[in-house]
Image (cartoon, rainbow, N blue to C red):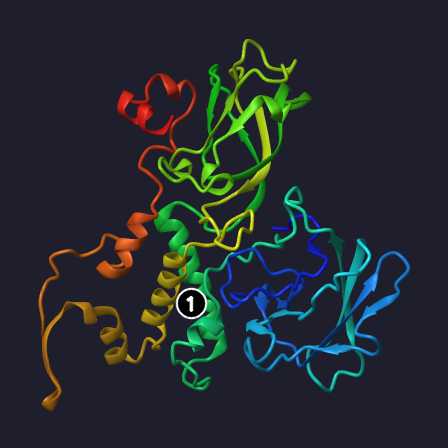
Amino acid sequence: MALQKPKLAQGQPNIPAEINQAGQANIPLHIFFTEAGRPVDVAVLDFTINTDPGGTQIFPASGQQAVVVDKFFPDGEKLSRGFYVAKYTVASTQAVGAHEIRWRYKRVSTDPSFLTKNVKFDIVILDASDREVDLTDATGIYCTENDIRSEGFQDIATYPSDRIMDLIESASRLIERFTGRWFEPRRMTLHVNGDGTRRLLLPVEIIEIHEMRLLTRTAFQIAGSDKVDLKDVIVYNRHLTQGFINPDDRDLPRVEYVIIGGSPVLNASIWPRGNQNIQITGLFGYTDPDPDARPYGITPKPIRDVCKKLVIRELPFMEDFERREDRQRRFLITSERLGNRSFSMAEHPNLGPFTGDPEIDRILLEYKKPFGIAAIGEGAWDSIPAVLESTFL
């Protein structure tokens, strides 16, 4: 899912210290390689940074900057199979404006010539009002191959990269399925039903609202739209804008109309009733406030840890019954003897509802979307229990 053109600020490095943790949407100047929808490694990769338009090379001073593709970060620039980043720090005196990273690569070293891919980005003055400095494409995964290798699984023959990447993707999708949420910023456009009240519940957690429109529909076609003045709208994303998580707006994502600028398209301070008649564009997802003050937050660390645990549970191949059972059922062991390999298991008193492993499922339950909130629809504010309304509003 493509987001808008990446931005880097003067004096800003594009690789933060925690770059090896994927799913945080803070990795400018990265590149993915896929083949038939699957990630694939490349043998040679380099880049230059150029102005755009004009094409004057500003980095490196001459030639190409090589990317270390055969070592994981921080020793190299590889994060996962087919996933690499450029190391580049914008000079504090670099002119602001449009720039371009020009990638060159070879799938195998014997290829006769390089293939190229150019990606545009902006260099800006770092300012609190610039909300896109640290935002790039969402990755859709919540840990990387590097994370798994760092847990001790270094032997590529025993733990192939293909298998690790497959398991990471599966674990990431399971996390989203079990919790009903995703844990990174994703740009999207929602169409929701107006319910005739001043508060509008949304089905996903709000990071930032960029635009709202009221749609006029005729015979299932959009006949026209009116743009809502966002000055007249309160966006409940206080966990990111104010660091305020009690109550936590992520548990009841919503926007509310208030009379400030007096938007002419809203009638009597309410969202007009209709079917998919309100269009909302913005960034959505469940992220934690970031101590380094990146405006869109980061993937919660417990979610990254759960992703690693889910992958490690499944690392042994299907035919390796002993290791698979040990990884998946060790939490049930009540006694163990190394001599003659004797051990006994008992039913765990607190089996989790998802994987059975209470250590994993406890975290998944903690991050699960509140029951029933996503299903609240037209007129729902009239039926929300008073205790819930007083808690969240």
Where residue 248 appears, as percent x and y from the top left, is 38, 38
Q: Residue at x 38, y 20 (%)?
A: 381
The residue sitting at 84% across, 77% down in the picture is 62
Is residue 90 shown above or below 338?
Answer: above
Judged left or right of residue 358, residue 311 is: right
Q: Nearer the viewer, residue 58 or 142?
A: 58
Farthest bottom residue? 339
> Which residue is outermost to the front?
93
Instruction: Give me the residue at 80% from left, 83% from top.
Output: 112
Q: Amino acid at mark 1?
A: Leu
Give above or below for 380 relative to 281: above
Q: How many marks?
A: 1
Q: Which residue is mark 1?
A: 167
The x, y position of residue 175, in whole percent, is 38, 54
The correct choice, above or below, for 372 with respect to 1 in the image is above
Q: What is the secondary structure assignment of the residue under circle 1? A: helix
Q: Is residue 30 above or below residue 276?
A: below
Residue at the limit of the structure toward the top, as seen here: 268
